[in-house]
Image (spheres, rainbow, N blue to C red):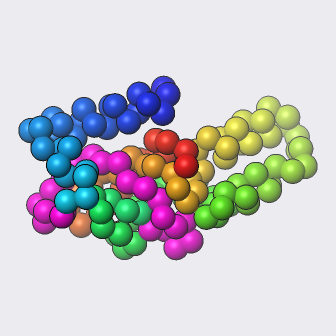
């Protein structure tokens, strides 16, 4: 799935959840206390993890699969450091290198966030920054 299709999918989910008000909610308006849903957010820092969602910086109550932050750095320079030297088996090396390039988040990435209650669950990277 391309980055563009992922963004379109999230916007469609937002539209269904909010009854058409998603465009207003993601344009920097205030966060309502009872809003649950799926949103796009920008990663503003990975150590510590912080995102910008609906114009607000969120740095607490964020949950993410630890595999998506392994060797993560704000610049993204450290993501491929473990793969400077190939290892055996070669298939595992290639898989892990590709996984880190595609899925480990860095500052500037856009991520899919599921917000429920006071928790923010990062489902994955939607668009590389």
Residue drawn at x 19%, y 52% is 25
The vertical placement of 107 against 100, above or below, is below
* Residue 107 appears in view: yes
The vertical placement of 5 against 29, above or below, is above
The foreground one among 36 and 76 is 76
The part of the chain drawn in magenta is: 30-50
The foreground one among 66 and 34 is 34
Residue drawn at x 12%, y 38% is 20
**Magenta span contains residue 114:** no
The vertical placement of 71 against 40, above or below, is below
Residue drawn at x 80%, y 56% is 81
Q: Position of residue 109 (x, y in %)?
A: 51, 51
**Magenta span contains residue 42:** yes
The foreground one among 50 and 97 is 50
Tally the numbered discs.
Answer: 0
In the rendered structure, the answer to whether residue 68 lies left or right of residue 28 reads: right
In the rendered structure, the answer to whether residue 85 lies left or right of residue 35 reads: right
Q: Position of residue 76 (x, y in %)?
A: 67, 57
The vertical placement of 128 against 57, above or below, is above
Quadrant of the rendered image containing residue 107? bottom right
In the rendered structure, the answer to whether residue 67 lies left or right of residue 90 reads: left
Residue drawn at x 37%, y 62% is 52
Q: Position of residue 12 (x, y in %)?
A: 25, 32
* Residue 68 appears in view: no
């Amino acid at each position: 799935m391309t980055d563009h299709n992922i963004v379109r999918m999230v916007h469609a989910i937002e539209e269904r959840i909010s009854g058409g008000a998603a465009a207003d909610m993601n344009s920097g308006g205030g966060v309502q206390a009872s809003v649950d849903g799926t949103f796009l957010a920008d990663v503003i820092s990975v150590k510590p993890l912080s995102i910008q969602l609906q114009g607000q910086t969120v740095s607490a109550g964020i949950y993410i699969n630890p595999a998506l932050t392994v060797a993560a750095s704000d610049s993204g320079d450290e993501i491929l450091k473990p793969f400077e030297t190939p290892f055996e088996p070669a298939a595992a090396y290639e898989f892990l290198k590709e996984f880190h390039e595609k899925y480990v988040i860095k500052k500037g990435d856009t991520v899919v966030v599921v917000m429920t209650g006071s928790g923010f669950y990062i489902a994955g990277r939607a668009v590389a920054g």
